[in-house]
Image (cartoon, coloured by chain):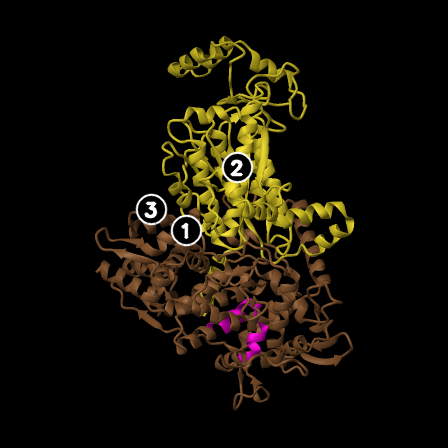
Chain colours: A brown, B yellow
Amino acid sequence: MSSGNLFRATVNEYLEGLPRPVQSKLYEAPATCLSIFRLLPPMAKFYIMSMVFNDHAVALRDLYKWTKPSANKLQFEALKRLKALHLIEDDRQTKGIQLNATFRKNFRDCLTGSQDPNAFGTLCILPDKNKVEISFLDTFASQKWETILHFMVGTESTATPSKSVLSLLKKGELMEGPGTSATNLKITNIGFQFLLQDVNVQIWTLLLQYLNLTQDLHMDPVDVLNFLFMLGSLELGKSYMVSNLSDTQISMLADLRDYGLVYQRSDNSTRFYPTRLATTLTSDSAAIKTPSNALEQAVGPDTSTSSNQGSVIVETNFKLYSYTNSPLEIAILNLFVHLRTRFSNMVCGQITRESIRRALYNGITADQIIKFLETHAHPQMKILAKERLDKKIEFDTSHNINTAGGAPQSKGKDSVSQHKLEILPPNIVDQIRLWQLELDRIQTYEGYLFKDFNNQHEYDSLSSYASEVGDLIWSDKKKMKFFVSLSEIGLNQVMVFANKKK
Amino acid sequence: MDAISDSAFREEIYQEGSNDDPSLLTVILDLSPSGWYNIRDRITINELVKAVLVFLNAHLSLNNSNQVAFIASSLNGSKFLYPNPERDYDKTQISSNVEDVDSNTDSEPSFVNKGMYRQFRLVDEAVAEELNKYIHDISSNIDLKKQNATLSGALSMALCYTNRMLTLDQSITTTTASAINSTTNATMADSNNSSTTTTSTSITSMKSRILIISASDEDDVKYIPIMNSIFAAQKMKLSIDIVKLGHQDSSYLQQASDATNGIYLHIIDPRGIIQFLTTAFFIEPSIRQYIILPTNSNVNYRASCFITGKSVDLGYVCSVCLCIMSIIPETKMCPACRSEFDPRILAQLTQTPEVISKKKRKLDAKGIENGNGNGTGNTNGNGNFVTDRSVST
């Protein structure tokens, strides 16, 4: 699972866990509607969009007719998510479903542009006397964020982040230690995992902790969330008025400034600037590649010398070289690489079974490691990978092998992506995955065994239904038995289906 | 055991398949005046554009890095309304802030609200403004001689743009305007050029689709360029969706959507077109494989003659290059590949119909009815005599 999905999952989980009145209060802000919409899976987005301009309830049966049977699982997931967020409501009269009225109104207004003009922040119309450049905002944001990360790794001679940040780190179990003094804190395993993640995920992890904290402080979570989502839709390099914010939001500004999300010249300045960290809050991993890269540049080796994005070279013999002298990056590499030598501008190491296993035991996943190596790969590796890919495609086209999917009906995913861009040597990627599989050779599923069918037909219809739903784990045709996993949708569906049959 | 691991892996693939990469939507609006005149009692361009702008907003709302492009096409040529390299998007925004009352009363007052989400507003303002200019241009200089059907031109522009956006690095394409700037810079300076090629290795791929809105009922679109664009689209794996307004189906547009796994809908009553746009035409490339497309399966696979340009139901086919002809060319050569036709077969084909019908009667004496049918059909003379027999060299 990519880190982008991870951050979605955490945010979504939080939103789904909110009580219903809070959720419907959230939907009163158009900016929040837009952001929540963006966090949904594609299928759910499609359903919402088809219902936004439709005032009538949609029959559930019609909804099922839109999709192919192979997509049943996706569909269940989408509907489940929408129900958990209370975005769709059952309509008793027609036995259909309908969008949440508040959400529909606000989202529609947002699309047609007829919402409250201040919903997306109030721009300062008067130009600022001392203009703030985007580059300044970037350095400000990265410096603030860098301080936090460096502190976590324990780099010497870095400033200590503010008290509020420290308490967040402790509350999120990213760091632990007796007392509140900064010197006693030590990074935890969760903290190391945190370091491997995308900046966006990191920010959300902290912000969610922050949200939990606000509930203890009796701040209105709706206000807080609305402000966060609004920040995500603001424009980089523009200043916004403080005066239109609520009291809660104004008190948040100081904290957000500590994280580098917002820039304010002084405490009582009437305007604030969102930084890149803030404006990409609600975008997914693909979109934040730019800021994260920009950040890596700043966080990584000397900002001035290295304009390239990555510095890691991995060879097919499991040797790894990284042109860096940043303690942060070296500390991260040390999590899963057996580092051997360190020079003034580079470190060498070896990826070994032990080093990877150590990381895996610490809760870091193989995918995280691979993703990290890919995003931090040296530009030269990327160029080589690209050349190889081009060659492969050229070879195929010259030998008339159809990889481009010339046939219109080639809907299968496999035919679409026969060749992938392989930045890392494939043997390394496979081996890291295999090392992870070594650790979990047995997978356990909770579920139900279906057996003692009266006839073959009954078995066939039920097992094929279960596989359509996507929860069939094992089946044996001869013994007429099959096993269904215990995800609530799956079991319920199969049970209902089975009862219907009887 | 195998079954267990299989199902676990399958689940993983599912999740990968359903993740949403950013996607590019290119809208081509066919503005040929006659077509819109024909349906003036059903929908005006103004109404349609309002719906389309909301549709564009909806697309942008899906994902932060989603992009749109808007091309208008008419008899005078096709033009990119958005993104427009000549337009400085930041600048217009500032100017509209300063003189907010003026610019609002000037152009479309109803279309674009000031407080709109920035991404939406930039696109909507640009499209509305440029479209006004464009329509003004059309109405001021109608050139009756230049009857080029430019849909094919617009389509190839869309394909070119898509291709460029697909190959550009994700980090450059955060905003379209900057993407254009960077590419123009890259063509200017070689050093820049090399830097863009080095960074053009993005892991996430952008997906794209094209939506054509056409009201034109005339079927004299240039067949060959359109077909070429369709094949290019197939290669790029982008689907072409068609909104057909007006009175008749367009067989070429049908073919375009059919060949590219797109959606073709002939909307006879275009009131409430926004509902059509947000349901039937809102199937993103990422979920397209899961949804039963609301498209019409009765596609008219008509081709058009290479010589006369008219569509044919039955015709001659060159056996070398599969070029389609409704008449035998006077040069006795294929107009496309210049291979010479076999004179004997040409002679056979140009024989007077009576001879063939007599022969046929001799061959199957029992099929009298059949023979009669042939006879009456073939008495039309040489020029209109059609057969699907191929001409070999």
Label 1 vs label 2, nearer the camera: 1
Callout 2 amino acid: Ile
Q: Is residue B226 above or below residue A137?
A: above
Q: Quadrant of residue A484?
A: bottom left
Q: A10 and A453: which one is in front?
A: A10
- Residue under label 3: A54
Q: Secondary structure at mark 2?
A: strand
Callout 1 amino acid: Gln
- Identified at 47% across, 52% down, the residue is B61
Q: Please report the bounds of the magenta region as a residue range.
A: A190-208
Mark 3 to mark 2: distance in Å?
A: 25 Å
Q: Position of residue A137 (x, y in %)?
A: 62, 64
Task: Residue B284: tell me if it is visible.
Answer: no
- Mark linked to residue A115: 1
Q: Residues within 10 Å of mark 3 (few under 14, many from 20)?
A: some
The chain letter for the residue carrying disc 3 is A
Q: Are marks 1 and 2 on the same chain?
A: no
Name the image quarter holding the N terminus of chain B: bottom left
Callout 3 amino acid: Asn
The chain letter for the residue carrying disc 1 is A
- Mark linked to residue A36: none
Mark 1 to mark 2: distance in Å?
A: 28 Å
- Identified at 51% across, 35% down, the residue is B29
- Identified at 45% across, 27% down, the residue is B36
N-terminal of the pair, mark 3 or mark 1, is 3
**Magenta span contains residue B78:** no
Q: Is residue A449 above or below residue B362?
A: below
- Residue under label 2: B28
Cβ atoms under marks 3 and 2 closer than 8 Å: no
Q: Is residue A357 above or below residue B50?
A: below
